[in-house]
Image (cartoon, rainbow, N blue to C red):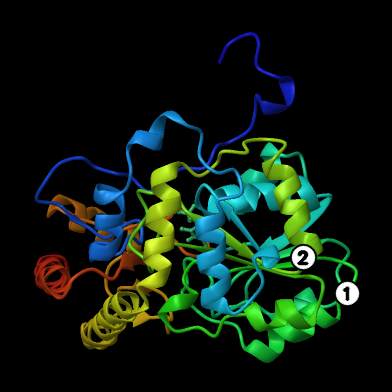
Amino acid sequence: MSRFLREKYMSMEPYTPGEQPQMKDLIKLNTNENPYPPSPKVISAILEGNTGDLLRYPDPEAKELVDAVAEYYGVSPKNVAVGNGSDEILAFVYMAFGEKVYFPSISYGFYPVFAETFMCDFEPIPLDDELKIVPDDYIGLDGTIILANPNAPTGMTLDPGAIEDIVKTNADHLVVIDEAYADFGTQSSIPLTEKYDNVLVVQTLSKSRSLAGMRIGLAIGPEEVIEDINKMKFSFNPYNLDRLAIRAGAAAIKDDEYFKKTRDMVIETRGWFTEKMRELGFTVLESKANFVFCKPDKISGTEYFEELRKRAVVVRHWDKDPIRDYVRITIGRDEDMQRLIEVTEEILCEKVK
Ligand SMILES: *Cc1c(COP(=O)(O)O)cnc(C)c1O
């Protein structure tokens, strides 16, 4: 730390991303990336697009992408904003609406970090003993509410009726639904954004569209809320999406057939993998995401995580209560999950006498 850092940032703990090991031959199931490549149409949009225009700044409105998203969801382009990943959209949310923020105590690790970065008052709300969000705890609060649906890292989904009740009973505050994983089997709250003026849905092309490396996030919501998001964007980084990202993102959204095919493959793998892990004695939470949150019954989560790592399988583990005994495993290709199961059998055999 230098002598020059602002005092309020001296004790700030930055977000720790899941490791991105650069070695080959590792089975990487730790950051919820899609195991399948982006649509071939995305690749041709990048490779065959005009490169002569790279000397010009990109379109600050990212119109090509905004229009594609609006058409896909049947909303007006005025209801759509785009960001450099949904992380940036969330940053805009905290900047614009972060006077006071509520979110679940176990959820996306960036929520409290953004609150520190943008100096927001915040209050994490505990989950119940089954690691579920308790919707009643979010009725009539006095600040912005941020809920990941499905939640991370549990993968569990909130009931659509429960979300609508939260929206209705917080009419004077914004309710933000982070749908990073909704494409893998959760009903979207986008229809609520047309019915209520206090809901914002945040999505990303990182997971279900296989574009984590391209950094594309979306916000869908009432026109005035989108205006506020764009006010933040134009006060921070108007060119937040580069030319390649705008083209690639639009191509990804338009190739719905490819999206559905790869999404269904992930869902199918999640199904058999969950069953198999339960047969091995694991508690596996009911996931609607492209990962499962599970705990072994005979060894600790920490030990399981470390033993997997020794065998070149990387998953995610948090050394904190009440999730220390769980690991989060991204759904990869069938052969990756098969390998993880073999390795798990090996570990259990060795460690459980
Ligand atoms: C992955 C993730 C994000 C961020 O995704 P980007 O890659 O920044 O678009 C946001 N929220 C949750 C819950 C996530 O898991």
Q: x, y (%) of residue 184?
A: 41, 79
210, 75: nearer the viewer: 75
The CA span between labels 1 and 2 is: 16 Å
**Measured along the vertical axis of the image, is residue 135 above or below residue 218?**
below
Residue at which label 1 appears? 171
Q: Is residue 259 visible?
A: yes
Mark whose residue sits in front, 1 or 2: 2
337 or 210, nearer to the observer: 210
Q: Are marks 1 and 2 in contact (CB under 8 Å)?
A: no
| Residue 77 drawn above or below residue 64 | below
Location of the N terminus by quadrant is top right
What percent of the width, then of the height, locates residue 315? 29, 58
Front in this rendered view, residue 48 or 315? 48
Nearer to the camera, 339 or 335: 335
Q: What is the quadrant of residue 127 in the picture?
A: bottom right
Left or right: residue 70 compared with residue 347: right
Where residue 193 appears, as percent x and y from the top left, is 72, 76
- Secondary structure beneath dot 1 equals loop
Q: Mark 2 sits on what residue?
A: 223
Question: Mark 1: which amino acid?
Answer: Ala
Q: Quadrant of residue 190?
A: bottom right
- Mark toward the start of the polypeptide (1 vs 2): 1
Residue that appears at 80% across and 79% down: 196
Q: Position of residue 250 (x, y in %)?
A: 43, 61
